Amino acid sequence: MTDLKDLSTEWLRWKAQEEAAVTERRKIEDQIVKMLGLPEAFETTETAEPTGMVVKIAGRIDRKVDSAKLQELAAEAGLSDHLPNLFRWKPEINMAVWKATDDSITKPLAGAITAKPGRPSFKITIKE
C-alpha cells in the first residue's frame, strides 16, 4: 500500500476499530467497578483475584488549580508562604508571547527549555 488514499482509508478503518474497542473496554471496566462495589470516586488501589488473575484498579480524582485564584486566596488569608510546600508550580511556555518577545529577553532563558518533537496527531475525514 503506497497510495495516500489507500493509507488514509486504512487509517480510518483502524481508527474506528480503536474507538469501538475503547468504548467496549470502558463498559467492561464500569461493570467491574460496579461488581466490586467500588465508589464512583476513590483514590486508592483496589485488588481483586479471580481464579488465575490479578485485577488492580487504581482510583484517581483529577484536580485542576486556578493559579491566580489560589494566590489571591492565599494572600487574603496570609497563607502565601505555604504555597510552595502545598503545590508544585509548573511553568509552561506561552509560545505566541515567547516568539513575539525580543531575543534579549528570551535568549538568556532558553537554556531552561528542552524541546523534543512529539508524535504528530492525525485527523482524516472523508469529503462530502
Image (cartoon, rainbow, N blue to C red):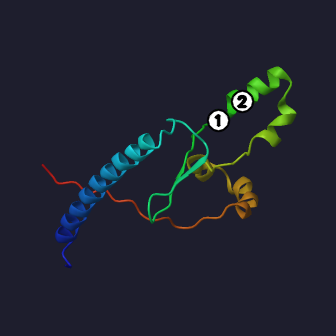
Foreground residue among 18 and 37: 37
Q: Which secondary structure lies at badge 1?
A: loop
The crowd level at tag 1 (other Cα within 10 Å; few <14, some 14-19, many 20+) is few
First in residue order: circle 1 vs circle 2: 1
Q: Give the residue at mark 2.
A: 70
The disc placed on residue 125 is none
Percent x, y of residue 12: 23, 60
Report which quarter residue 103 is drawn in: bottom right
Q: Residue at x 39, y 59 (%)?
A: 121
Q: Give the alpha-carbon distance from disc 1 to disc 2, as whole Å.
A: 7 Å
- Callout 1, which amino acid? Val
Left or right of 43: which side holds 15?
left
On screen, residue 29 versus residue 66, left or right, reads: left
Quadrant (top left, top right, bottom left, bottom right) of the N terminus: bottom left
What residue sits right under mark 1 in the picture? Answer: 65
Is residue 2 or residue 54 the one in the foreground?
54
Report the amino acid beneath label 2: Leu
Q: Are marks 1 and 2 in contact (CB under 8 Å)?
A: yes
Note whether 18 is above or below 26 in the view shown. Answer: below
Q: Residue at x 25, y 63 (%)?
A: 14
Is residue 120 left or right of 83 when viewed as pictured?
left
Residue extending farthest left: 128
- Residue 37 in the image: x percent, y percent? 48, 39
**Residue 64, position as x, y percentages in the image:** 60, 37
For label 2, the SS is helix
Residue at image x 61%, y 42%?
43
